Amino acid sequence: MKRVLITGVSKGIGRALAEVFLKNNFFVIGVGKTKPEFDYKNFHFIYNDFENFKDFSIDFPLNIVVLNSGIAIYKKLKDASLNDFEKIFKINMCGNLLTLKSVLGNLEKDGLVSFVSSIATLNENNFENWGLYSSSKIASEKALKVFAAEEDLKLLIFNIGRVDTDIWKSVKGKEANLPKMNRLAVAKQMFNEIMSALNNNDFSFKQVIID
């Protein structure tokens, strides 16, 4: 049985992706603050508050690591406090990177690292009130590219558009009424991309836009 570790599995894309992996007979290790109520024997949860990250270890190999955990703080940059910056970077960037560091020795030689980012990081997208969120994701993307180069890791980055998740429920104004993708459909598309990359011996890096 293959094993995948996913951060941020309590809701949203992380939960949907965990369910897709579980239904495809993966052993899923979820990392985060809140344990989801899954009725699967092949699910294991590790508590970790990314605002106060604690190093952890596991004693079995991993085929895939999905770094998904993230929050949004929806305000203009001129109104953002130091606490806002610290919180969003601790959760969206530091927690995910430190998770990868904690389990790096468990990742199989042909294993895969995947990061769940956003279309907000793309050059042409400068969404009002999304500066905190997009800057944390951009920084994470760059840090993971360097990490992957340093450690010779396969890296798959997803830049995902509007999905029916809690992050988009906090949006106000004209963007609030824009159509959103179904999270399970997005998770299934992500799963297919992940499996394709995992099974490709020549794979090194890919950035996939789902919008």
Image: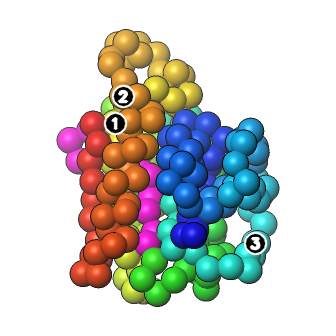
Residue 161 shows which numbered tag? 1
Is residue 118 magenta-colored? yes
As helix, strand or loop, the secondary structure at mark 2 comes to loop
Query: Where does label 2 land, which residue?
Result: 181
Q: Is 191 displayed left or right of 95 in the figure?
A: left
Give the position of the C terminus as an image quadrant: top left
> Which span is picked out in magenta?
112-125
Q: Are marks 2 and 1 in contact (CB under 8 Å)?
A: yes
132 is within the stretch colored magenta: no
Q: Position of residue 71 (x, y in %)?
A: 58, 41
Counting residues from the N terminus, which is met first, the one under dot 2 or under dot 1?
A: 1
In space, the residues marked 1 and 3 are separated at their CA atoms by 31 Å
Q: Residues within 10 Å of mark 2 (few under 14, many from 20)?
A: some
Location of mark 3 (residue): 55
Q: Position of residue 175 (x, y in %)?
A: 36, 19
Instruction: Look at label 2 and name its amino acid.
Output: Met
CA neighbours of label 3 inside 10 A, class few (<14), some (14 to 19), many (20+): few
| Residue at image point 46% right, 87% down | 109
